[in-house]
Structure formats: C-alpha cells, structure tokens
Image (cartoon, rainbow, N blue to C red):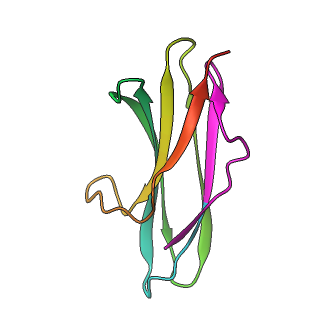
C-alpha cells in the first residue's frame, strides 16, 4: 500500500476543523481494507480522541480517504494520521503522519 498525504494544511490551529486526506494506492496483490485513523494527543502524549474512515480498495486501484475532527479551543495538542487494515486488527499499512496543532 502506497500512502500519499493530500492534506492541504501542514498544521492546524486550535478550534479549527482539521480535515485530513490521503490517497491510498493498493499494490498488495489483493483487495485490501484500509482505515484512515486520525488521533489527537495532548502535549504529554496522552490519547484524547480519534476519528476513522474505512474503505475497501481493489487491487491495483486507489482511493482517497478523508476524515475531519473538531479541535479543542485551548491546550497543546498534536495530530497523528495513519492507515491500518482495520481498528480490530490494527496492522499498520503506512508510516505515521505527524500534524502539529498551533495555538491561535
């Protein structure tokens, strides 16, 4: 699976709607489930929240996966986006994409 980050913003601000998009190209030799997970962590690395979008991508095809999360109004956070085969199996199909959240 080849993952291309299509997110227009390299960072988001507190209070924003963070819209994350990736293009997933399936070169695995079989149809593949892909779940885009975007997780919010506080400055200490504590997991706060997540959103997930899931799709089955046919072999030798690609798909754009998009999720959106409303960011808190205050605090210090970072977003991490990654592709897993599913929330149940949690097998990673991509590297982690780190996306900073900046104060207003």
- Tell how many labels: 0
Q: Which residue is depicted at the point 54% across and 11% down? A: 74
Quarter of image, res 42: top left
Position of residue 34 relative to residue 79, above or below, is: below
Residue 63 counted in the magenta span? no
Q: Which residue is depicted at the point 68% across and 55% down? A: 6
Judge by depth and name the residue closer to the eye, 104 or 92.
104
Position of residue 68 relative to residue 6, above or below, is: above
Quarter of image, res 50: top left
Residue extending farthest to the bottom is 29
Residue extending farthest to the front is 44
Q: Position of residue 44 (x, y in %)?
A: 35, 24
Residue stretch rendered in magenta on the structure: 1-22
* Residue 96 left/right relative to 104: left
Q: Quadrant of the C terminus?
A: top right
Q: Position of residue 57 (x, y in %)?
A: 51, 72
Q: Position of residue 37 (x, y in %)?
A: 45, 48
Q: Which residue is depicted at the point 46% across and 52% down? A: 96
Q: Position of residue 10 (x, y in %)?
A: 67, 41
Residue extending farthest to the top is 74
Residue extending farthest to the right is 8
């Amino acid at each position: 699976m080849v993952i291309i980050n299509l997110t227009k913003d390299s960072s988001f601000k507190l209070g924003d709607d963070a819209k994350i998009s990736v293009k997933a190209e399936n070169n695995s030799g079989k149809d593949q489930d892909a779940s885009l997970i975007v997780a919010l962590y506080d400055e200490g690395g504590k997991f706060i929240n997540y959103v997930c979008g899931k799709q089955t991508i046919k072999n030798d095809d690609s798909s754009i996966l998009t999720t959106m999360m409303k960011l808190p109004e205050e605090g210090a956070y970072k977003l991490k986006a990654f592709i897993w085969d599913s929330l149940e199996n949690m097998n990673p199909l991509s590297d982690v994409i780190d996306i900073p959240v900046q104060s207003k």
